[in-house]
Image: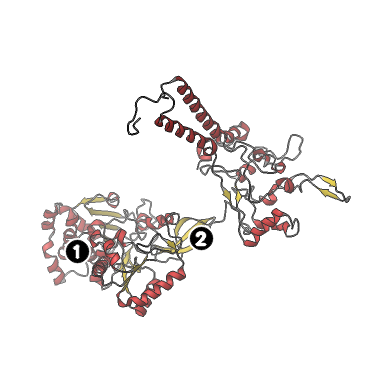
Amino acid sequence: MNPNETSAQPDASGLDRREFLRLSGTLAAAGALASAGCQPPQEQTIPFHDMPESLVDGMGRARFFHTVVDGSPVLVRTREGRPILVAPSPTDASGRGLTVRHQAALMDLYDPDRAKGPVSVRRGKGPTVASSWSVVGAEVVSRLAKAGSGAVLLTGPVASPSLAAAIAALSAHTGLKHVAWSPVEPDAAASACGQAFGSSSAPRPRLDKADLVLGLGAEFLDRPADGLERDFALRRSPDQAEGTKMSRFVQLEGRLTLTGANADKRIRVRDSQLAPLACALAHELVVVKRTGPLAGNAAVEAALAPFAVDAVAKTAAVPAEQLKALAGELAAARGKALVLAGGSASGSTAGEALELAALLLNVSLDAFSAGLFDEAAAELLPSGSAKALEALAGEMHSGKVTLLVVAGANPVYDAPASLKLAEALPKSPSSSP
Amino acid sequence: MSLGRTPVRILMLVLAVAVTGSFAYAFSNVRKGYEPRQPILFRHTRMAGTPVWQTDATGAKVNVGGFGIPCVYCHTMPYKGRHSTVPSTAVCMNCHTSVGLGREWVLKMKDYWDRGEPIPWVKVHDLPDFVYYDHSAHLNAKNEKGEPKIPNKDAQGKPINQCEACHGKVETMEIVSVQNTFNMQWCLDCHRKPDMKAPTDCIACHR
């Protein structure tokens, strides 16, 4: 029979090829199942070599260790050597608390792909090889010495003062340029603070001290950070202690956010109209009602002149009476009112204007002088990293970077795709511990 | 040979029954009789068994049975914690710094001790990971009269080893094996006894 022909009529003498394969496959599977497939896997139970006194296995005393996660000091609770809870450190005086990112960092410790030690990857030279810190350290030092002034250190946001000092010392010693990159950062707030106060250090708003909170697209409940949501919640219970009353929260926003959904009054405004609206409120307060330290200041009045409530209300499609009533409410609560911007509005192109208008409102409402902002817990906002990374990407594309050391950052993953960092990386010799 | 023919059909049917049957049998009883070999041939008969005294050739009396060491001397935690615990090598060294020094398996154990490595014992009683089991809760459970729910003495007042209720007479086993099915049916058989008053809701064990 021609071997290329498939026969529909089986050979009378026995099995044809397909039947044979089918049957033998079935038998092999059955055999494998019967011999091994039904046994549970053999497991080991590894005792201590020398068990510590007073330890009860499975009920082990909880142990704690201090560490820094995402720039905040935290206390991690462990059971039998396994971390189970990230809690705020009791020694953290800032009172910022923890965010969901801190809580989620616990899962990183169980990531099977996490780095368990230094590994060596040579581009185009085979697979990853386990290395040691002494080897990595020696290599980084020798390559730094060779790289000269073209060496760049790329890190995540540096919150630790000791790490910042170490990097500064390293830069002074070797000429290493430091670039800190964070994909999420309050750029607009930082630059507004810089323009208004001369430093990008933002005092922490105390929502637990405010009787009236005005949100201009604020999202402190959507992206819990710095313990703002906890402070806010303290004043939102109807059962308040003697002498305080439940706070009122008015939110102006475009997109419906969780924060807006929790407001006593939510006014729908386009994100792009938030900055003019904030200015209109400032106009009403400073120019019309002559409230606050800036009342009568000719420069401020001139700057606010185009933002009369009636004109802005028309373009923003918000009833003018509503805005005037809101301004009246703010003026009445002066010294007890606080304005918060943020969220997607703050991240837009008009974000800086919005943040500045919020600062102007806060100054007019005496929020800073009345202690509604905690200067002691001021936080140096990371800023300008997007611009720094863009500049770095340009240098990498033109081959000016002789050595790139990446520590605690993953720019190929989280930098804007337009920078084309993945293409630029092979152009600069890099080392990424 | 095609599936249309009677003998092939019969063969296929027999195969199907055999495969399904072996599956059903295997899954109904995967644990009972499990008798893994350990890295060290530890004899529970010698440690925990009852003493048997004999006179050897020189006329000296020797114990050819066990030393009658109670289970909790080594498995220290069943009354305190979830696990009864496998003893650390330090517990072996409590005695073996002075007895049985030249024996093959004692030397092996000492090897681990000297290297500072734990002994990789093979788990004999191994419940699935989705089952929560707590030794202390079972051993400390008492009825209204204040007697342990897992009895520690029989009708005549003679003491019984509580461990036996599930693990069988380990002191008579040369190689420790699983004496009960250790499946959900077996757990529930006991939990459902009226005088046990034990929880039978899913969350009791599947936490």
Q: Amino acid at mark 1?
A: Ala
Return the x and y of residue A362 as percentages of the image width and height.
25, 64
* Residue A64 image label: 2
Q: Chain of mark 1?
A: A
Please give left or right for residue A310 compared with residue B178 in the image.
left
Which quadrant of the structure image shows residue A370? bottom left
Mark 2, Cα crowd under 10 Å, few <14 / some 14-19 / many 20+, is: some
Q: Which residue is mark 1?
A: A353
Q: Residue under mark 2: which chain is it in?
A: A
Q: Position of residue A346 (x, y in %)?
A: 23, 60
Q: Is residue A182 left or right of residue B131?
A: left
Q: Is residue A234 above or below residue B153?
A: below
Q: Residue furthest top?
A: B6
Mark 1 nearby-residue class (10 Å; few <14, some 14–19, many ≥20):
many
Which quarter of the rendering shows the C terminus of chain A?
A: bottom left
Residue A409: x %, y % from top left: 35, 63
> Mark 2 against mark 1, which lies toward the viewer?
2
Is residue A348 or residue A423 the one in the foreground? A423
Label 2 secondary element:
strand
Q: Which amino acid, by three-letter code, is at mark 2?
A: Phe
Residue A90, labelled with which disc?
none
- The earlier-in-sequence mark between 2 and 1 is 2
User: Is label 1 in a helix, a strand or a loop?
Assistant: helix
- Decide: is A54 above or below B151: below
In this view of the protein, can residue A324 be seen by the observer?
Answer: no
Instruction: State if disc 1 and disc 2 touch (CB < 8 Å).
Output: no
